[in-house]
């Protein structure tokens, strides 16, 4: 926020503040880029084998704290707040996000609790990266809908709903491939879940997620594939009742749910990137009135690159996190 100190020279306007801000932004961009680049290196340099669950959880808490801290620090600074103050708030948000991911990775029954923790943490980081108080706005995504409660000048909250265009696009694309929405599973786990007869795009997979939309193989189909792979008689389709197949299927869902948490948590990153340059104006004038929210899309897309390409068979940090927390079969 700060004071606008403007030097008037003749007809033109020269603002020290603006020059200083531009300079800080450039420095900040370099710092954010180095922080983002450093985190994967620090992660990758550690040996993965023989880790206890506690060690994995500690690492995930630390990673999410540093990542959200760096994003919020930079975002807050762009908005006139101190870097480290915003970093601390972002780290708090990141810790809650890690808690949400750990909760859902441990047990599908924690799906809603985990989603709330992640949404809450993402909102704190978002507010910090906007240079706002941590209770300025609370947001949660459910499929293509983004719901936001934002504090008004009177201290109460206004509700608004926005469209997440990337989520809508994934939903349409999966439906067009013949997947069916499972309403009960979707409501129980807090995100749209589609049942598929076969996932081959972009690669053969048991489960896949795009934005916050999950597609997962039908249990019978999965049972059939796994039993064939394991060299068990797989000429019929009656394996889906087996406890082992049920467990496998659930761990795939754990894994994909963690990906949806990662999507939720990219809100602050997208906002911070979109705040650079003139996009801030376009957002206010065009996207806000249309109730279209691009934060998650931009954040999700760019973090996939920043944290390593997020393709199947390619161990990006996001994949590593999802595998480590869900214990999902490779
Ligand atoms: Zn994955």
Image (spheres, rainbow, N blue to C red):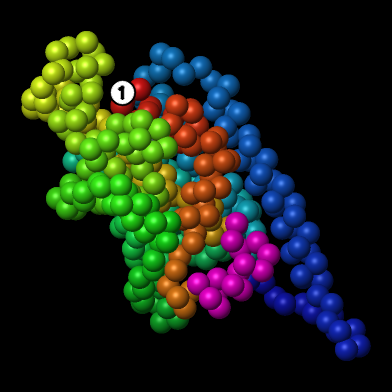
Left of 184 or right of it: where is 53? right
Give the image location of residue 253, x and y in percent: 26, 37
Give the image location of residue 262, x and y in percent: 42, 44
> Does the magenta portion include 275?
yes
Left of 29 or right of it: where is 264? left
Left of 264 or right of it: where is 130? right
Q: Is residue 227 above or below residue 217?
A: above
Q: Residues within 10 Å of mark 1 (few under 14, many from 20)?
A: few
Residue 85 visible to an observer of this rendering: no
Q: Is residue 250 above or below residue 31?
A: above
Give the image location of residue 132, x and y in percent: 52, 65
Instruction: Tell me which residue sits at (29%, 31%) in the image.
Output: 206
> In this view of the protein, which residue sits in the foreground, 141 or 69?
141
- Magenta segment range? 273-287
> Does the magenta portion include 246?
no
Give the image location of residue 170, x and y in percent: 37, 52
Residue farthest along the right direction in this orientation: 10
Mark 1, residue position: 329
> In this view of the protein, which residue sits in the foreground, 229 or 30?
229
Residue 213 visible to an observer of this rendering: yes
How many marks the image carries: the answer is 1
Q: Quadrant of the C terminus?
A: top left
């Amino acid at each position: 926020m700060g004071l606008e100190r403007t030097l008037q020279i003749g007809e033109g306007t020269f603002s020290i503040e603006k020059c200083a801000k531009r300079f800080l932004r450039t420095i900040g961009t370099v710092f954010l880029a180095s922080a983002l680049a450093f985190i994967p290196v620090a992660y990758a340099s550690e040996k993965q084998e023989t880790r206890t669950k506690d060690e994995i959880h500690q690492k995930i808490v630390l990673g999410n704290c540093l990542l959200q801290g760096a994003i919020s620090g930079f975002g807050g600074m762009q908005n006139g707040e101190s870097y480290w103050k915003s970093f601390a708030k972002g780290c708090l948000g990141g810790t809650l996000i890690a808690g949400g991911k750990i909760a859902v990775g441990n047990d599908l029954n924690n799906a809603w609790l985990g989603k709330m923790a992640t949404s809450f943490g993402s909102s704190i980081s978002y507010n910090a990266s906007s240079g706002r108080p941590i209770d300025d706005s609370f947001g949660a995504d459910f499929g293509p809908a983004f719901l936001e409660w934002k504090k008004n000048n009177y201290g109460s909250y206004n509700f608004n709903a926005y469209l997440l265009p990337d989520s809508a696009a994934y939903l349409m694309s999966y439906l067009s491939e013949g997947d069916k929405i499972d309403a009960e599973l979707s409501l129980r786990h807090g995100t749209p879940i589609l049942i598929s007869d076969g996932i081959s795009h972009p690669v053969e997979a048991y489960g896949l997620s795009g934005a916050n939309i999950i597609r997962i193989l039908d249990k019978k189909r999965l049972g059939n594939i796994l039993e064939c792979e394991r060299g068990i008689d797989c000429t019929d389709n009656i394996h889906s009742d087996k406890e082992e197949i049920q467990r496998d299927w659930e761990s795939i869902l754990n894994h994909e749910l963690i990906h949806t948490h990662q999507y939720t948590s990219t809100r602050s990153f997208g906002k911070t990137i979109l705040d650079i340059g003139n996009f801030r104006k376009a957002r206010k004038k065009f996207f806000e009135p249309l109730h279209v929210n691009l934060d998650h899309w931009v954040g999700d897309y760019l973090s996939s690159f920043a944290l390593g390409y997020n393709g199947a068979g390619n161990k990006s940090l996001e994949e590593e996190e999802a595998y480590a927390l869900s214990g999902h079969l490779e």
